[in-house]
């Protein structure tokens, strides 16, 4: 008689496999019914933007054909950041729309079409899930997007690439929409639409080419609640001086690029504990600071709560840089410095 494992052990064995090891999980799913159920539980839980139209289509077709598999999906991220013909794009959007109807337990969703063409009306109607995290990279579909957001009552992390308030009769999104947001990312239109009136603690503000100067009267009160701010991106951002006076409770600040009197504004942020100076998301634009150690020493003297300063030292591509990190010295001890390569998990702190 062939010995058999107790059924309850299959789950423990499968849980030792990384969800990125899709080849092994797919092989196990073809072994037996029990292995298939447990392997699919891990295999379909997270689908994180695999850059292959074929992989995306196969995943979506499986979810459409088998609602049981669709109920396993908790994270679904897809970006059409590869060459694709209009008809193929339309077909993939149609598959996404159908597949989402079979994902009642979806909690994190990120989507972008090629070039950011609007897609909210096509895929965000009558969705059966309540998201906690939402990342939308399409443009020009604010009205349909707002109708979707009105149905989402558990959202806490929201990224919307752009938002044009001129499409509505009000500057800000009603507070009844997504009232639980704690983290917001996007361009100025998104910040101006969602930040006012909400107690959002984390913002990633990525400027656009033609963004206006920040409206202090509109944003000032909400900015006082921020504890984490990342500021900058591809294009020149507003000077830090335009918002520094409102950052009364900020603890972590990332500046992508240094402009004008940015460093002189740092002491105006009274509770700042961690400062990170990154490079802009553009090739070959260095940090215009010649002696990083002197900058760190000066800021430690000026800012009593500042404990850590991280400054980009070498750029590798649009996104990756090496860093040097200084910690506040004790008494007259030398200032501690650490070299951090671009792929170090320390950079996430």
Image (cartoon, rainbow, N blue to C red):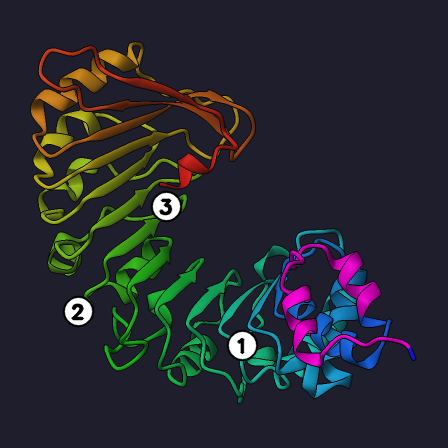
Q: Quadrant of the N terminus?
A: bottom right
Picture mark count:
3
Residue 87 seen? no
> Closer to us: mark 1 or mark 3?
1
Q: Quadrant of the C terminus?
A: top left
Magenta stretch: residue 19 in it? yes
Relative placement, left or right, of 214 versus 12 is left
Toward the viewer: 42 or 7? 7
Quadrant position of residue 101: bottom right
Q: Secondary structure at mark 2?
A: loop
Percent position of residue 330, x then y:
13, 19
Percent position of residue 59, x then y:
74, 70
Magenta stretch: residue 129 in it? no
Q: Residue at x 53, y 77 (%)?
A: 106
**Magenta segment boundaries in residue numbering:** 2-28
Percent position of residue 320, x then y:
51, 31
Mark 1 or 3, nearer chain start: 1
Mark 2 or 1, nearer chain start: 1
Q: Neighbour class for label 1 at 10 Å: few (<14), some, many (≥20)?
A: many
Quadrant position of residue 10: bottom right
Residue bearing mark 2: 197
Residue 106 disc label: 1
Percent position of residue 87, x then y:
79, 68
Quadrant position of residue 69: bottom right
Relative placement, left or right, of 107 versus 15 is left
Residue bearing mark 3: 207
Mark 2 or 3, nearer chain start: 2
The alpha-carbon separation of the residues under discs 1 and 3 comes to 30 Å
The vertical placement of 198 against 331, above or below, is below
């Amino acid at each position: 008689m062939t010995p058999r494992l107790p059924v309850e052990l299959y789950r423990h064995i499968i849980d030792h496999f990384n969800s990125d090891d899709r080849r092994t999980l797919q092989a196990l799913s073809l072994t037996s019914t029990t292995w298939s159920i447990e392997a699919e539980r891990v295999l379909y839980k997270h689908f994180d933007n695999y850059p292959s139209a074929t992989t995306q289509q196969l995943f979506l077709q499986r979810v459409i054909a088998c609602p049981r598999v669709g109920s396993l999906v908790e994270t679904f991220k897809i970006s059409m950041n590869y060459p694709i013909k209009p008809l193929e794009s339309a077909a993939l959007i149609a598959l996404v729309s159908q597949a989402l109807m079979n994902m009642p337990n979806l909690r994190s969703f990120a989507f972008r079409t090629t070039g950011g063409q609007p897609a909210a009306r096509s895929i965000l109607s009558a969705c059966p899930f309540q998201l906690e995290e939402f990342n939308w990279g399409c443009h020009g579909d604010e009205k349909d997007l707002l109708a979707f957001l009105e149905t989402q009552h558990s959202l806490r992390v929201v990224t919307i690439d752009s938002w044009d308030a001129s499409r509505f009769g009000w500057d800000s999104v009603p507070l009844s929409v997504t009232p639980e947001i704690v983290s917001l990312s996007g361009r100025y239109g998104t910040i101006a639409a969602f930040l006012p009136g909400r107690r959002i603690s984390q913002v990633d503000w990525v400027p656009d080419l033609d963004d206006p100067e920040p409206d202090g009267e509109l944003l000032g009160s909400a900015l006082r609640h921020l504890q984490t701010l990342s500021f900058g991106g591809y294009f020149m951002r507003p000077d830090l001086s335009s918002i520094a006076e409102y950052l009364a409770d900020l603890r972590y600040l990332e500046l992508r690029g240094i402009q004008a009197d940015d460093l002189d504004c740092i002491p105006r942020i009274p509770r700042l504990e961690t400062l990170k100076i990154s490079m802009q998301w553009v090739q070959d634009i260095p940090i215009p600071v010649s002696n990083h150690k002197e900058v760190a020493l000066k800021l430690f003297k000026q800012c009593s709560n500042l404990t850590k300063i991280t400054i980009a030292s070498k750029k590798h591509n649009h996104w990756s840089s090496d860093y040097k990190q200084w910690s506040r010295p004790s008494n007259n001890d030398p200032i501690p410095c650490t070299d951090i390569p671009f792929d170090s998990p320390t950079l996430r702190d």
